[in-house]
């Protein structure tokens, strides 16, 4: 293929980004991947791809990444619920995204798929009906620095699309499945539940999407997405208690877990955040976690199903594949 057929992917060492890179490779796309020098590269095993060392805040590496490419998938983001310096997350998720999109336009990239998040979207009261791409939301209603950064980034990307940058937006829900190397916060929950290290939980609601379905949705957005449009890549809307029930079903070892009220946990979250500032280690519980748990995060993928041909499998399949992968790679030691 000609040089112009290259596809540049950011975030390919991450959970969703790696799934997108694998899906592109399976379709025969020659790849160029942005990787940090310190990143774990297990995800990249077996992929025939050119690697560009750098990061989102290194504008020279972004320019080298997009040069001569036909397509760009911008999947990378700083994905942490709590950060000691919020401004750093804003720089990575908002300003670096703008830099990348403008560089891609200058390089003559034909189409960009930007990975936003359902975190940038509005929510319906108690999850009914499930939220869509047009459910109202304002900045002040968005909880936490991560969600606020994704909201700001998405609004900026929508504006750039109006200015002529050829970008399509996808909004993944809660991905679960194989290849969660780090693992992500959702993956940690699945792992801990599967190993009996989750004696209590706060119930909430989430849209569970198999990571490979999410990746397939990215490619469908490349093929069929309309410039400047958003597409939710969700799955089965399910309560946290039912996710945990699925974990028990897969492992065959039912666990007794206590459902905790949110209010009494707030002081513990304050303590955890204080300790995190001292140690520099990300806390397992924060006030933003609790604020988000108060909301039922159910979403509809009807637009992506109708316009892109998107489909998703049951949450049970995602949980089963995640636990199978964790078991195979030694994550489930009790």
Image (cartoon, grey):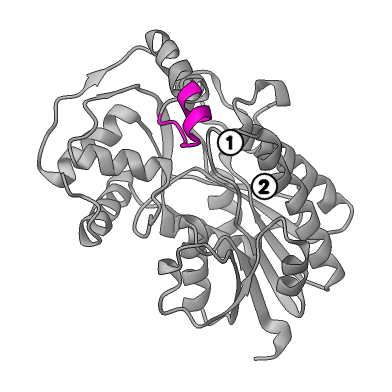
Question: In this rendering, would 206 be left or right of 145?
Answer: left
Q: Is residue 131 above or below residue 141?
A: below
The earlier-in-sequence mark between 1 and 2 is: 1
Label at residue 308: none
Give the CA separation, mark 1 to mark 2.
13 Å
Seen as rendered, the residue at the extreme right is 163
Residue 208 image offset from top left, x and y in percent: 40, 42
Q: Nearer the viewer, residue 21 or 49?
A: 49
Label at residue 119: 1
Picture quadrant of residue 44? bottom left
Residue 259 image offset from top left, x and y in percent: 27, 18
Q: Is residue 327 above or below residue 116?
A: below
Q: Tell me the element at label 1.
A: helix
Q: Residue at x 70, y 90 (%)?
A: 2
Q: Nearer the viewer, residue 60 or 195?
A: 60
Seen as rendered, the residue at the extreme left is 253
Seen as rendered, the residue at the extreme top is 264
Picture quadrant of residue 90? top right
Residue 7 image offset from top left, x and y in percent: 64, 75
Q: Is residue 193 above or below residue 257?
A: below
The span picked out in magenta is: 274-284
Label at residue 230: 2
Can the viewer see residue 322? Answer: yes
Q: Is residue 314 above or below residue 100?
A: above
Picture quadrant of residue 164? bottom right
Q: Quarter of the image containing the N terminus? A: bottom right
Residue 24 image offset from top left, x and y in percent: 53, 73
Can the viewer see residue 127? Answer: no
């Amino acid at each position: 293929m000609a040089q112009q057929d290259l596809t540049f992917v950011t975030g390919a060492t991450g959970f969703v980004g790696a799934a997108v890179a694998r899906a592109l490779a399976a379709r025969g796309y020659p790849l160029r991947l942005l990787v940090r020098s310190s990143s774990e590269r297990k995800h990249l095993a077996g992929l025939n791809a050119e690697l560009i060392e750098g990061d989102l805040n290194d504008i020279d590496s972004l320019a080298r990444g997009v040069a001569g490419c036909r397509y760009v998938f911008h999947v990378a983001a700083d994905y942490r619920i709590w950060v000691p310096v919020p401004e750093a997350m804003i720089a990575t998720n908002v300003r670096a995204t703008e830099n990348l999109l403008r560089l891609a336009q200058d390089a003559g990239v034909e189409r960009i798929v930007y990975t936003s998040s359902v975190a940038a979207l509005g929510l319906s009261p108690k999850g009914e009906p499930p939220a869509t791409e047009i459910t109202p939301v304002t900045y002040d209603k968005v909880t936490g620095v991560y969600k606020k950064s994704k909201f700001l980034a998405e609004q900026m990307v929508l504006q750039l699309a109006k200015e002529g940058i050829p970008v399509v937006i996808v909004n993944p829900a809660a991905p679960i499945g194989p290849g969660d190397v780090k693992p992500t916060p959702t993956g940690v929950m699945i792992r801990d539940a599967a190993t009996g290290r989750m004696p209590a939980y706060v119930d909430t609601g989430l849209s569970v999407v198999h990571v490979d379905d999410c990746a397939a949705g990215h490619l469908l957005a490349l093929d069929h997405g309309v410039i400047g449009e958003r597409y939710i890549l969700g799955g089965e809307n399910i309560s946290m208690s039912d996710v945990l029930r699925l974990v028990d079903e897969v492992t065959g070892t039912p666990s007794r877990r206590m459902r905790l009220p949110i209010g009494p946990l707030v002081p513990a979250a304050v303590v955890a955040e204080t300790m995190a500032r001292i140690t520099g280690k990300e806390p397992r519980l924060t006030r933003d976690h609790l604020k988000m748990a108060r909301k039922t995060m159910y979403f509809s993928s009807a637009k992506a199903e109708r316009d892109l041909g998107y489909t998703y499998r049951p949450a049970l399949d995602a949980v089963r594949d995640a636990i199978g992968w964790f078991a195979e790679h030694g994550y489930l030691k009790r």
